[in-house]
Image (tube, grey):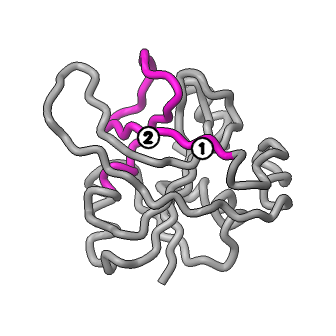
Amino acid sequence: MRYLIIAEEGEREMALRLFPDTPVIITGVGALNIIRSLKDLPRDAELINIGYAGSANYPIGTWVRVNEVRLHHPNVSYDEPTICLNGKAMPADPEAFTQAPLNTQAALNTQAALIAAVCYTNVDFVLASPYQDCVFDMELAFIAALGFTNLTSFKYVSDNLSLHQYHEKSQGVS
């Protein structure tokens, strides 16, 4: 079975535009909500995580296909796994990328045009980071850590590490 995994209701329209007629699971933000929402799903279920993410340098409106995910803990260093994702193709339907509120580039009609990047999952909103060419979210590492074997993630850059920009782009997602 295939499921769209989103953190908040405000991401539903964006996710269903890309993968119509796919059941949606709204997890809530953060680790505890992820665990509660997904703990009973079969580990071989096809999960597609769609969501907003911040970036220090990618322009707002950029789509990213996440190829690996790590926890973000900038103040300490310890041995911790990097989890690689399977990286399935985003739908090739150009209409999915041209309708509001998504202001995406026409180049996203092909898999090759998508930026492949690391996603750093944090337990709080990231407001500053020296990390470049990556995105920040608050769920993906926790989803991946549950052991799902068929996990893909696409992130839409909603902000450049600005809570105000995030609220504007997410249209009221709190």
Which residue type does callout 2 highlight?
A: Cys
Crowd tier of the residue under label 1, counting other residues whose Cα lies within 10 Å: few below 14, some 14–19, many 20 or above: many
Q: Is residue 172 visible?
A: no
Q: Residue at x 47, y 55 (%)?
A: 7
Which residue type does callout 1 highlight?
A: Val
Q: Is residue 46 above or below residue 158?
A: below
Nearer to me, 43 or 28: 43
According to the picture, the residue beneath numbered tag 1 turns out to be 64
Nearer to me, 110 or 162: 110
> CB under 8 Å between callouts 2 and 1?
yes
According to the picture, the residue beneath numbered tag 2 turns out to be 119
Q: Is residue 68 visible?
A: yes
Crowd tier of the residue under label 2, counting other residues whose Cα lies within 10 Å: few below 14, some 14–19, many 20 or above: many
Q: Which residues are magenta?
A: 114-143
Disc tally is 2
Q: Earlier in the sequence, mark 2 or mark 1?
A: 1
Q: Secondary structure at mark 1?
A: strand
